[in-house]
Image (cartoon, rainbow, N blue to C red):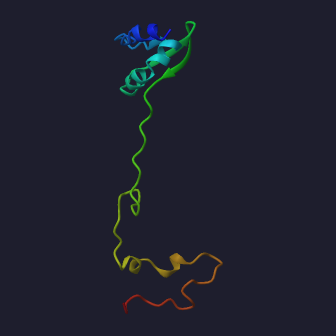
Amino acid sequence: MKANAAKMPAPKPARKYGKPLQVNLYEAKTHLSNLVERAAKGEEIVIAKAGKPMARLAPAAEQKARRNWGQNLLGITYMAPDWEKDVPPEYFQDEGMPNPFGEEPQSNEGR
């Protein structure tokens, strides 16, 4: 039985007009790595059992690039040391909560 598997040719390329290549289950097991490479290149391959489509090999969706640590969505990685000078201290206070800076917020002028 192994001798027959070695003589079996690889599946032919899919037709040009977009119809997916249909491969029977035995052929798919024999040539799986070849079929996966073809699917990764963009070809759609249908695996059938007794002529009935059972599964489809298609290229995986591309994963989004991961953000670098320390960057926001705009890619900003630098904050000026005096970034909070323009922001009024009331902005940091929640309604109904005590002032996190005490009664009188100190100015940043002395830094």
The answer to whether residue 31 is above or below residue 81 is: above
Classify the position of the C terminus by image quarter: bottom left
Residue shown at 38% from the left, 22% from the top: 38
Report whether 66 appears left or right of 53: left
Residue shown at 49% from the left, 81% from the top: 89
The answer to whether residue 94 is above or below residue 49 is: below
Residue 91 placement (x, y as % from top left): 51, 76
Residue 25 placement (x, y as % from top left): 53, 14
Residue 7 placement (x, y as % from top left): 40, 8
Residue shown at 37% from the left, 90% from the top: 109
Total numbered circles: 0
Residue shown at 55% from the left, 6% from the top: 51
The answer to whether residue 76 is above or below residue 9 is: below
Report whether 53 appears left or right of 106: right
Residue 104 placement (x, y as % from top left): 53, 91
Of residue 36 and residue 17, the one placed in the foreground of this image is 36
